[in-house]
Image (tube, grey):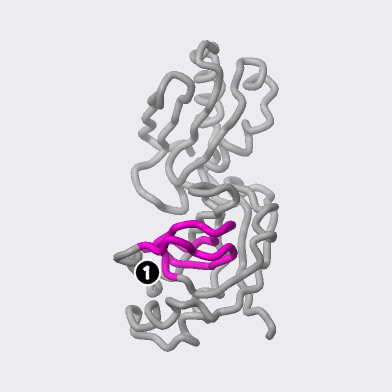
Amino acid sequence: MPPTKINTYFLGDACLCWELGEKIDRLTSLRVLYVYRQLRKSGELVRLGVHDLVPSYTALAAHADALCDWEAVRRIVDASIAAIPADEAALKGRSARHVLPVTYNGSDLQRVADHAKLTTEEVIRRHMAPDYLVAMIGFRPHFPYLLGLDRGLITPRLDSPRLAVPAGAVAIGGEQTGIYPETSPGGWNILGMTSPELLYAIEPGDTVVFKRAEV
């Protein structure tokens, strides 16, 4: 079932966005990802000049030649949105499952534990428990934004972001968890480390599971 309210807007003259929700939640992400999967290999969109489709938590963006037939692009995407199924299992479709080993020795593990009033072992257990939905890739190439974090682990970002978070850092920022694919600035709480090369195959709509790395 498509969302009852859809906002469409341009970002500049070469990107048209469809907003399917106003807040981060699993159902909205599944709807966005359903449309993304249906259309990302659309030959008709390519013929019209669309060269990239980018999902976010609440919206889908079509990047195209500025002088393309935007009305035709809009009709194709609108038709896919109208066909969104009501059943969550149908929304999920078939996707890859990635199991990422994590060495839980991050510099902010104790901070997360203190904020949650839990032991570090309980933080680790709760962080490994969910099957996370890859809602989008962003911030840096291959950085997965993951939905499914235990709400008891929600932790504010650092007051002063680090200038260099190491590649492979598994971290929590607010109600999100994600993985840094390369060394970069960042203000999320680092729980541990995994291999950044494992991120290259992850795509929006996939599932990520964390397991404790054997040492």
Q: Nearer the viewer, residue 58 or 115?
A: 115
Residue on which the image places disc 1:
154
Query: Looking at the image, is 142 positioned above or below residue 20?
Result: below
Q: Secondary structure at mark 1?
A: loop
Q: Residue at x 54, y 37 (%)?
A: 54
Q: Residue at x 55, y 43 (%)?
A: 33
Find out whether residue 89 is within the magenta segment: no
Displayed quadrant of residue 215? bottom right
Image location (x, y in percent) of residue 210: 60, 71
The three-letter code of the residue at mark 1 reads Ile
Find out whether residue 174 is within the magenta segment: yes
Image location (x, y in percent) of residue 203: 63, 49
Q: Which residues make up the magenta segment?
A: 161-189
Tag 1: Cα neighbours inside 10 Å, few (<14), some, or many (≥20)? Answer: some
Q: Nearer the viewer, residue 141 or 163?
A: 163
- Say whether residue 110 is visible: yes
Q: Residue at x 63, y 53 (%)?
A: 206
Q: Is residue 211 left or right of residue 77?
A: right
Query: Looking at the image, is 64 positioned above or below residue 139?
Result: above
Furthest residue toward front: 163
Furthest residue toward left: 159
- The number of callouts visible is 1
Image location (x, y in percent) of residue 8: 39, 26
Query: Looking at the image, is 175 positioned above or below residue 65?
Result: below
Query: Looking at the image, is 180 positioned above or below residue 4?
Result: below
Displayed quadrant of residue 114? bottom left
Q: Residue at x 61, y 15 (%)?
A: 48
Image location (x, y in percent) of residue 196: 64, 61
- Say whether residue 136 is visible: no
